[in-house]
Image (spheres, rainbow, N blue to C red):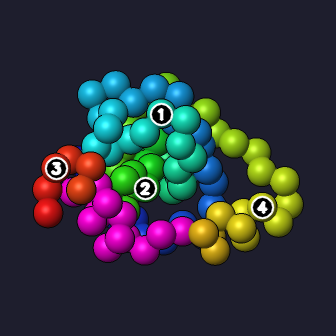
Amino acid sequence: MRINQGRPRTRRYAVCVEAGEYEGVDLIPRKIYEVWPDDDAGSIGQLRVVDESGEDYLFPAEYFRILTLPPGVDRLFRKSRVPPGERRAAARHRRGGD
């Protein structure tokens, strides 16, 4: 189930340590993902993560480790973000689509 709660105010990041059934399409192990705040998700052991499609979805929290970034590094992550349309095109290409 997907519930978009809007853009987060404080950005957090996590590294994917396991992708389970989502590997290769939605999540890539050892990749860093943006995590959006979602208190309801946390209460059921989930994290709201912006996946390879560029959309935010719930994934098991055990698949990730939250990162503590040094001051200023967050800004570098924001600058290096790939626009969602380009992420979707890349994901389709990996799956063998257009």
Q: CA distance from mark 4 to mark 1?
A: 21 Å
At 58% across and 39% down in the image, what residue appears?
A: 15
At 76% across and 45% down in the image, what residue appears?
A: 68
Mark drawn on residue 50? 2
Q: Residue 84 in the image: state x and y as whole percent.
A: 37, 70
Reply above or below: 33 against 5: above
Dot 2 falls on a residue whose secondary structure is strand
Name the kind of residue labelled 1 in the image. Answer: Pro
Dot 3 falls on a residue whose secondary structure is loop
Mark drawn on residue 96? 3
* Residue 90 falls inside the magenta stretch: yes
Q: Residue 65 in the image: state x and y as whole percent.
A: 61, 33
The residue that disc 1 covers is 29
Name the kind of residue labelled 3 in the image. Answer: Gly
Mark drawn on residue 73? 4
Dot 4 falls on a residue whose secondary structure is helix
Q: Earlier in the sequence, mark 3 or mark 1?
A: 1
Reply above or below: 64 against 40: above
Judge from the rendering whether residue 70 lies leftward or rightward of residue 63; answer left or right. right
Dot 1 falls on a residue whose secondary structure is loop
Span shown in magenta? 81-92
Reply above or below: 19 against 68: above
Q: CA distance from mark 3 to mark 1?
A: 20 Å
* Residue 97 falls inside the magenta stretch: no
Q: Earlier in the sequence, mark 3 or mark 4?
A: 4
